Image (cartoon, grey):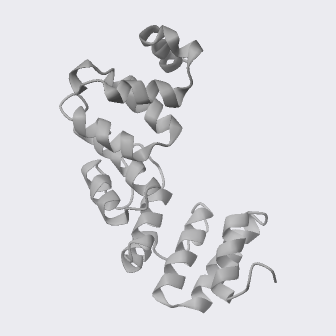
Amino acid sequence: FFNVTNLYDLWPEWDFMDEQELLDKELEKPAFARHDAAAITIAFGLGRWEDVLRLLDDFSDDIDVKDRAGLQFSALCALGRWRPAIEAAERAGIKYGQFDDESWLSPEYLSCLIKADFDIEALKLLGIHQDDEPPFYDWLRGLALHQAGDAPGAEKCFERYLQAYPGDLLALSDRAELRGEDEDD
């Protein structure tokens, strides 16, 4: 709520233009004349990831290093730039697969590791299945095992995950891919 009311204070014309147009006008201004945090908020909300990265670079001195790196991590993941995203996560303070404020391993970070072909590193962080772990660990473990070439191990992990979340379409799709099933099957 505060962010939205703050945006209305900065741009009274908000009611008369859409967010895309507002952000475009803000990006046309020289960096020193922009409303940095507000522009980043709008770009992030719109999923304009390249603009998020550009704004973060323009305002690098005004944003805490860890906060900036965390936003970069999200933007780089959304853009599919896995290795730079991993580097950003490290600058954001990820340790042993967890950010400071998270009680579980970061699914975004583990997914990023897997997609960057660091499946073994992801498996090391996930470890072996524990009964008290969150179910999504098995989904990620299944993806990593599949990437590493262990189809039977991946299948077992997907089955455990799908017992907890039987309607998860993404996991069902991942399992179908593992099995070599066509979407039309």
Decide which of 70, 8 is in the foreground and name it: 8
Q: Is residue 131 left or right of residue 126?
A: right
Relative vertical location of residue 92 with respect to residue 18 in this rendering, above or below: below
- Report the residue at 61% width, 68% height from top: 131
Give the quarter of the image for residue 70.
Answer: top left
Question: Residue 125: x, y in percent?
Answer: 40, 69
Q: Is residue 90 left or right of residue 114?
A: left
Relative vertical location of residue 166 with respect to residue 42 in this rendering, above or below: below
Decide which of 120, 114 is in the foreground and name it: 114
- Report the residue at 67% width, 66% height from top: 170
Quarter of the image with the N terminus is top right
Task: Using the rendered image of the protein, determine whether residue 105 is visible from the camera's viewpoint.
Answer: no
Question: Residue 50: x, y in percent?
Answer: 38, 46
- Report the residue at 48% width, 20% height from top: 3
Task: Using the rendered image of the protein, determine whether residue 46 is visible from the camera's viewpoint.
Answer: yes
Relative vertical location of residue 9 with respect to residue 63 in this rendering, above or below: above
- Report the residue at 59% width, 90% height from top: 151
Q: How many marks?
A: 0
Question: Residue 87: x, y in percent?
Answer: 27, 59
Quarter of the image with the C terminus is bottom right
Question: Residue 174: x, y in percent?
Answer: 64, 75
Q: Residue furthest left?
A: 61
Decide which of 129, 136 is in the foreground and name it: 136
